[in-house]
Image: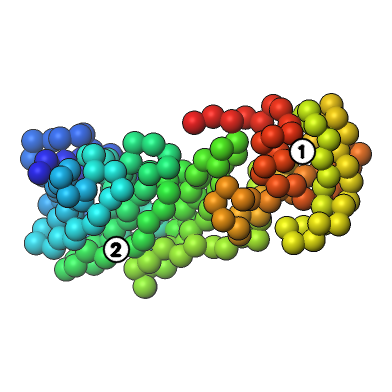
Amino acid sequence: MKTRVLSALFPVLLSLPALAAEPVRADLDGDGKPESITVKWDVDQGSFTLQVGSASVRAKTEDPNEGGVEVVDLDSGDKWKDIAITTGQTDSDHRVFLYGFDGKTLKPLGEVHALTEAKGNGIILSDSWMGFWNKREKYVLDRPAWKIRAVPQPLYAVGVECKVKQSFPLVQGRSDKRQVATLAQDSRIQVLAADTSGRPGEEFYLVKSSTGLLGWASRADLEGKTEGLPFAG
């Protein structure tokens, strides 16, 4: 096992050097007494163990490599600080494990794909790459329950433009194939939002045509019959 320890960062994120010689002490529970914080990585088992004082918790990871550790102030309106442990070297296996400490025990708050934005207002925004757009999810901290809770969205904002290289229809919806419009070759369209309720890779997209009409298109049509989508990663 290898040990990575935390150093302090201010005001919202407390970032620590990778592989500091001694555990760092930080006040997590707001009692004015700093706790000793260490993380031990078990590459063979694909896990890590977080220890704060005499309390510890172990978690499995998809990527067994050593990750990063930060102390985060998810809600600057309360006395607590929390711990974020980042694992994964690619977007597909990237995860952030969040923990709180109530003075006696470590509390698993939950996991997010990434800590894209955490300004200390109890809200976390987390982005994940979907091939040509970022899916932004929102979580709120429920401190009394020591959990973060996802805020459901009916659709996810996309906001990219592309050019039609092969004509295809826009339809009423995922299960309603009645046509709204047929997109003209060489016209430009706006991909406004995504419905991710289906299986991975089968997202449906709300599209605005060059004539101002709205309808739905499959991922397959967008990938195969347009050009200019910002694919990366």
Residue at 18% x, 60% y: name it.
57
188 up-or-down from 9: above or below: above
- Viewer-side residue, 53 vs 93: 93
User: Would you say 179 lies left or right of 204 here?
Assistant: right
Disc assigned to residue 127: none
Residue situated in front as seen by the camera: 228 or 39: 228
Disc 2 residue crowd, few under 14, some 14–19, many 20+, Cα 10 Å: some
In the rendered view, does 201 fall on the left or right side of 123?
right
Answer left or right for 108 relative to 203: left
Q: Is residue 11 visible?
A: no
Residue 43 at least partly seen = yes
Say what amino acid the circle numbered 1 marks: Gln
The residue nearer to you, when weighing 224 against 193, is: 224
Label 2 close to label 1 by CB (< 8 Å): no
Q: Residue 86: where, in percent of width, then height?
A: 31, 45
What colouring method underlies this structural image?
Answer: rainbow
Q: Tell me the quarter of the image containing the N terminus.
A: top left
Task: From the top left corner, tell me how far across and down residue 19 is, in percent.
Answer: 15, 35
Q: Nearer the viewer, residue 22 or 212?
A: 212
Pinpoint residue 30: horizontal percent, then vertical percent. Answer: 24, 60
Question: Which three-letter amino acid code belongs to the residue tagged 2?
Answer: Pro
Could you tell me residue 202's position as x and y percent? Answer: 62, 50
Q: Residue at label 1?
A: 190
Query: Mark 2 = which residue?
Result: 108
